[in-house]
Amino acid sequence: MLKFVIAALVALGVVLLSSWVLPPANATSPDSEVYIWDYAFIGSSQVVCKKVVFHPVNRPLPPGVEVQPTRINSRIVNDSNCDHLTKPISK
């Protein structure tokens, strides 16, 4: 029984030391992309399929801000990419 307690304490010590000594990985999320039905441009009544890509941006933020800055790009793609989505009715 004493062996298990000592082994558990040693394992806990290794975990705690490694978390304090080694800095965490500077992980970034990969670009997310989605397909949506949207208007071709502002003021347009034509509904098209768009590919929207979200690029995380690594830049300093003011203190207290807890959101990740993101750059968003969109472009018109073939309608077959949005076949799985319900197309809105254009007026």
Image (cartoon, grey):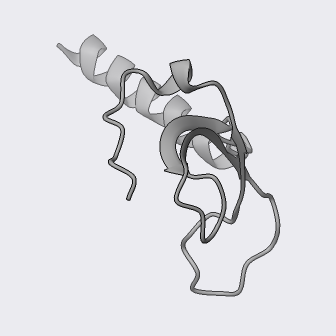
| Residue depicted at 53% across the width and 18% down the height | 80
Q: Quadrant of the C terminus?
A: bottom left
* Residue 79, position as x, y percentages in the image: 55, 26
Occupied quadrant, residue 27: top right
Count of number-bearing discs: 0
- Is there any visible trace of residue 51 in the rendered image? yes
Counting from the top left corner in percent of width and height, residue 85 is at 36, 30
- The N terminus appears in which quarter of the rendering? top left
> Is residue 18 something that shows in the picture?
no
Q: Is residue 11 above or below residue 75?
A: above
Q: Is residue 40 left or right of residue 16?
A: right
Quarter assignment of residue 61: bottom right
User: Which residue is the extreme one toward the front?
Assistant: 91
Image x and y of residue 7, in percent: 37, 18
> Camera-side residue: 73 or 29?
73
Residue 83 falls left or right of residue 40? left
Q: Could you tell me which residue is drawn at 59 percent across and 63 percent down?
A: 44
Against 59, is 61 above or below?
below
Q: Against 89, is 86 above or below? A: above
Furthest toward the bottom, the residue is: 63
Question: Residue 65: x and y, percent?
Answer: 58, 81
Q: Nearer the viewer, residue 37 or 70?
A: 37
Front in this rendered view, residue 7 or 19: 19
Front-lying residue, 48 or 28: 48
Q: Is residue 29 left or right of residue 66?
A: right
Quadrant assignment, res 3: top left
Residue furthest to the right: 59
